[in-house]
Amino acid sequence: MPADIESSEIPITTEISLADLLRSVLTNFAHDIQADIVAIYSYSHDLKEEALIVALPERPPQIVDELVRAFCIDGQHASTRIVNPNVPDFALAQFFLFKLADEAIGALVVLSHSQPAGDITSPQLKPCLSVIQNLLQNHYRIQSEAISHTIQAIARQVGEGVSPQDLVNLVSEHLLEPGIRFCALLMYGPRREDRPNGPFAYLDLQGVWSSRFPAGVGVGMHLYLDQYTEMIQEIEARKIWHVPDVKAIETRFDSLTRGFIRGADTNSIVIIALESFGRPLGFMVIGTGPDREFSQQELRSYQVVSEFLALRAMAHVLKQEQDIVQQGRAALLDAVHDGVLMILPSAGSVTGDNSKTSVLTVNQAFSSLFGISQLRVQGLSLPQLLSKMQLPEDVRQSLKHHWLAATVRDPSIQRGDFSMIHPDGYHSMISWYSAPVYQANRVMGRIYIFHDVTDDRTAVSLRANFVSRMSHELRTPLTSIKGFAQYMLEELGADLTPAVTDYVKIIMDNAQLLNTLFTDIIEITRADVGDLKVNTSTTRLGDLVEHVVAQFESHPLMEHKSIVRTLDPNAPAVQIDSGRISRVLSQVIKNALQHTPDEGVVRITTQWVTHTGQLPFGAPSDVIVPGILVTIEDQGEGISVEDSELIFLPFYRTRESRAARLEGSGLGLAIARSMLTLHRGKIWAEPRRRGRRSTRFYFILPTTSD
């Protein structure tokens, strides 16, 4: 309200229209100001439209409507005076703006054929302006309250599973006045998860009410968008498109839609674009009967209610999309043969404690494997789920210890094995794997995968037993060959020619090489099937490194080469089998010396690593920390990215090693990996890169808990 106008309460009765009240006020106002035409317009900020309420003695020229609209949109001044306006036959035009909460709600127009005319802001006219202001404000409030009551009435009846047809039925019941022929809700389609904002192919008629036909007639009809491209662009630009005479645009509709409009005996239509949070949803279309025009109040009501309908339609669309996604995920999970479990933190859990979790989903394979239905697990915490899974008690306690030791949001990966009796009655070995699930770079939960490895482990065990037995059997004749060769050298050496002596030595050396090879094969196969036992003790890894390096001092590979150690004095002890880890160190150091040229240096470094941020770039994701990281770097040509993983496979040798005819069977690094795996450690190689051609071998051993 302008500051210079005082508000006064004016009783409004429902029997007298706003136009009649304003006409009685304007009669005196026109006489006092001595104007030729006075008029009052209402203005809708939502519609960006003006509407003439009353004019005396006649309607202003059409151009005045446009001037009023521009004046209300500008809305910067309480009043203005225009001299020599672009209004035919009028020398003076004055405009006065009415507001409610700084929003334009109407305007007073005074037109004079000649100057001068009275000033509409003069003190004697203030009471009239105040009355007009209050009448418009009360009318606007009544409109707003009616719209609010309509939305509330609709909202009270809208349930969770409301359909577009239900929405249209509610609108027709609470909002549509007599003379309205039809109301339709058209939604874009088809909607795809990967393209929620289109492009779309058609408009789907999802809800319709008609005064002539039963509700829902025509639902499912498609209006293909290639026939309405220009019209849709125009509607989306306007947001609300009011067509006073539908016959003027009926040629722009297809024949089926045109027939429906004619059958409904439609005079004018209003089309409102529905969108929510920038997502286009569709349109609401309302049509009137013959000689029936939409009022500004109706248009404003439809637009406000359409925003509410857009939110409800959006909820319906999102529910459909969610159902499709959930069905797709369920089908995908059930197609997986491994058991799958997904958990999330419980509502209100800040720390992500695994005891305060909630099961999101399991698949059919999980239900079958552990004898618990998918419906029973929904919402259970992880401890509650474990108590219901059909497992041996020692396995249950072991899993509880591992799973509850870390939080739901722990980024580390967990894995393990356990034995159980399969629901089909046979003894089975289950391998499980747990990893974090990310959303927007944030851990939102964990997924657990359960794989029956019984057949795989059985096949590996059979193969390992066969290889081990064959290797053992082959060692017996090798022992005889080596023994006889040694006897010939010791007892008959004086009687042998030099050539024969050399041949016997070759036989003896190769017998020893084969014996070592068979020993390595037996050891690696036993390690892979878990038959290799370790005798652990608390050991300082730095002392063990010094001991192994000392053994290389007289080794032929050390000629013209050196080993430099940088050992962490603060590193704690590790619980290891010293003999087996000594062999790992020996193998990696020997490998580094073989690839280091004369006068070169092999560098050995130990470092106590307490968190994953201290690990070198490219470290495996399942490294266990805290632990002691050992780095062994040579000064050779380095290895390629492809070979950096293959060198840990049995019998694999790089092309460079074969070309240089370096001694070895290709089992050393494979054995080293197996030994470290027994200690829950990891070994990996860093390939050469730009600016550095050497190779770095890393391995890490977890430290003791104390």
Image (cartoon, rainbow, N blue to C red):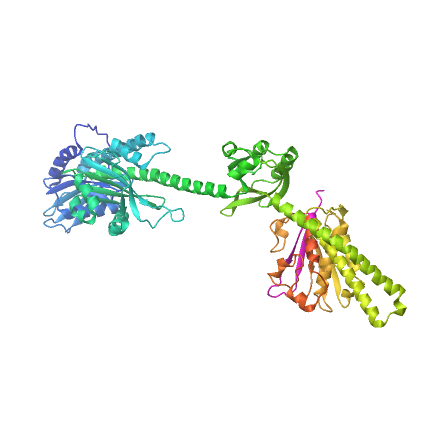
Taking 170 as reference, is 557 left or right?
right
Q: Is residue 298 above or below residue 91?
A: above
Residue 583 in view of the camera: no
- Tell me where the magenta segment starts and ends, as one range: 678-706
* Image position, residue 674 (x, y; %): 69, 51
Q: Nearer the viewer, residue 701 or 386?
A: 386
Classify the position of the C terminus by image quarter. Answer: top right
Q: Say how many tags the image has.
A: 0
The picture quadrant where one finds residue 210 is: top left
Give the residue at the far bottom of this rendering.
498
Q: Quadrant of the N terminus?
A: top left
Q: Is residue 51 visible?
A: yes
Task: Say if 684 sits above or below 149 in the image.
Answer: below
Residue 700 placement (x, y as % from top left): 68, 51
**Left or right, residue 620 beside residue 171:** right
Query: Does residue 140 appear left or right of residue 548 in this picture?
Result: left
The question of residue 36 being in magenta is answered with: no
Q: Nearer the viewer, residue 396 or 45?
A: 396
- Say whether residue 695 is magenta: yes
Q: Residue 128 appears at what percent x and percent y?
A: 18, 35
Q: Nearer the viewer, residue 56 or 565?
A: 565
Q: Position of residue 252 (x, y in %)?
A: 20, 49
Vertical comparison of 681 with 391: above or below: below
> What residue is drawn where x is 34% and y is 39%?
313
**What residue do we see at 86% from left, 64% from top?**
488
